[in-house]
Image: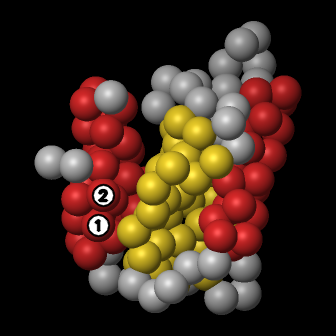
Amino acid sequence: MTLADRLEMLRSSLSNCQLVAFGDAEARLILKAAHATSMPRETLDHLCEEATTCFATADMMGAQGASANEALVLTERESRVYLRANNRTDFLCVVSALSEDPDAVTEQGLRALHEIAGAA
């Protein structure tokens, strides 16, 4: 299964998901994305920057080397869940409607991310 297939599978498994993107925080680049409607590159760049900021902040705030591998950003229109595996630089971003359960998004997203990371 390709990376594009895995991202699309995750996006379609969440009923209110608009976008799933896989990126690299160190390179500051979204490598692949699955989305229901056209997504401007600027939007993807913003999501990558936001993920980088979330994880860098978590790393700075971490106690005794511990850091967060999950971040949730809420806006008036959507939720953005950012996930990384084992403090790696690659991450997954899931953008969905506020009605989507963030715990379910996190659970399914982590499962997909571990599959992607394991295949890399």
The correct choice, above or below, for 80 with respect to 40 in the image is: above
Rendered-image quadrant of the C terminus: top left
**Circle 2 sits on which residue?**
4
Identify the residue at horizontal 23%, vertical 64% (top origin). Answer: 9
Tell me where residue 46 appears, x and y as whole percent. Answer: 74, 64
Q: Is residue 82 visible?
A: no
What separation in Å lies between label 2 and label 1 (alpha carbons)? 6 Å
User: What secondary structure is marked by label 1?
Assistant: helix
Q: Amino acid at mark 2?
A: Ala
Looking at the image, residue 113 sits to the left or right of residue 94; the answer is left
Looking at the image, residue 107 sits to the left or right of residue 77; the answer is left
Look at the numbered discs 2 and 1 and tell me whether their residues touch, using CB distance below 8 Å. Answer: yes
User: What secondary structure is marked by label 2?
Assistant: helix
Q: Amino acid at mark 1?
A: Glu
**Circle 1 sits on which residue?**
8
Q: Nearer the viewer, mark 2 or mark 1?
A: 2
- Numbered label attached to residue 97: none
Q: Residue furthest top?
A: 64
Q: Is residue 87 visible?
A: yes
The correct choice, above or below, for 116 with respect to 89 in the image is: below
Tell me where residue 5 appears, x and y as whole percent. Answer: 23, 59
